[in-house]
Amino acid sequence: MARRLVCLLAVLVVTGCSATPEPGSAAGGSTTSGPPPRTSAPAPVSTSPAQGPVTLSFAGDVHTAGRLTERFQQPETALLPVAPLLAGADLTVVNLETAVTDRGTAEDKSFTFRAPPSVFDALRVAGVDVVSMANNHGVDFGPVGLDDSLDAARQRGFPVVGLGADDTAAFAPYLVTLRGERIAVLAADQVADSTVRRYSAGPGQGGVASAFDTDRLLQAVASARQQADTVVVYLHWGQEEQSCPTALQRDLARQLSQAGADIVVGTHAHQLQGAGWLGRTYVAYGLGNFVWWRSLSEVSVETGVLDLTVDDGQVLSVDFLPARIDGTGIPQPRVGPDGARAEADFAALRACAGLSDSPG
């Protein structure tokens, strides 16, 4: 909390303490059996000569619709109140739950969402460095919307994972080196939505990286393992309004761990799910909503930021900063006794997740 307060002062002067590094290179790879050995492959990007642990921050689903629409008309300030929650990290990742386009035809589904390209500017001001768009709303406006989303991110130099012009691009990791730590971030979707089924990325087919193509996802993780010290997989998965992970989630988490993932985090349930250790892999099944367009229930507005300090692929420390989404759709920190209760409630979710409170 202390480092976040320090960063808040800087946020008020500039635009955030979390520096967005230049994108690294993306690469596919051949299938390997089990976690491949780490190699001495050169770091794709060097942002600092200093060595030492790196702090990664993760938060849940981000939206721009409903009560948030007017806010995003001013991207330079839209998410500035969120910055203190994210400011202490070296790298921050969230899920962007929308297409980024003003064109295309809406898919035939109950909810479709779109955001202006300036959403990437707002995310950068908030301290977000990478977004996953591997979710059931990333292609809500068809191929035209998909092309626009990719173009908007490219024009702004904003890293997007889990969405691409084909499967090679969609499953490619974002690669960056921070203080000597080579980090790979991948993303995939495991929600059986009609849009995801229609727009799963494949050879010559743009769309989202589908976790239902398990072999392809595990291949991508194995390839990233050869290029990075720390491998992160961000997933959109699980059952809505369920606090316990499904058997499908738990099975995929085990496979990702075996393939070489050091960290697995996810969203989609619209509420928090358990977090803890699966062997040497840290798994957070659900981080809930984060910047959200409407309140569904009390649990739907409970959220938080997960800080993981890593070094050479090992998670050295875990810090969960609880928050509650207010009536404007913005998360507010929960502190004092209320914060302590929220942290205890989050820890209790581990019981049905099959995870440990320490690495095994």
Image (cartoon, rainbow, N blue to C red):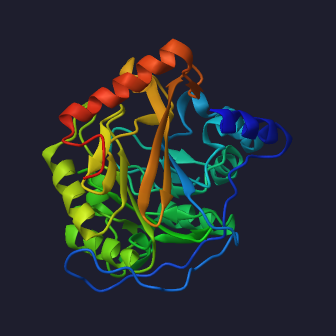
**From the viewer's perspective, is 307 left or right of 23?**
left
Whether residue 305 is situated above or below residue 170 in the rendered picture: above
The residue located at (19%, 49%) in the rendering is 250
Which residue is at 36% across, 61% downward?
Answer: 262
Residue reaching furthest to the left: 247
Residue 255, horizontal then vertical, whole percent? 20, 63
- Whether residue 343 is visible to the viewer of this picture, yes or no, is yes
Q: What residue is shown at x 38% (from left), y 52% (from top)? A: 135
Report if residue 213 is visible in the image: no
- The image shows residue 354 at horizontal and vertical percentages of 18, 41
Q: Position of residue 107 (x, y in %)?
A: 37, 51
Q: Position of residue 74 (x, y in %)?
A: 75, 39
Front-lying residue, 205 or 281 = 281
Asked if residue 277 lies left or right of residue 292, the reply is left
Task: Quarter of the image for the N terminus: give it.
Answer: top right
Within the image, what quadrant is residue 6 found in? top right
Left or right: where does residue 355 sit relative to residue 170? Answer: left
The image quarter containing residue 245 is top left
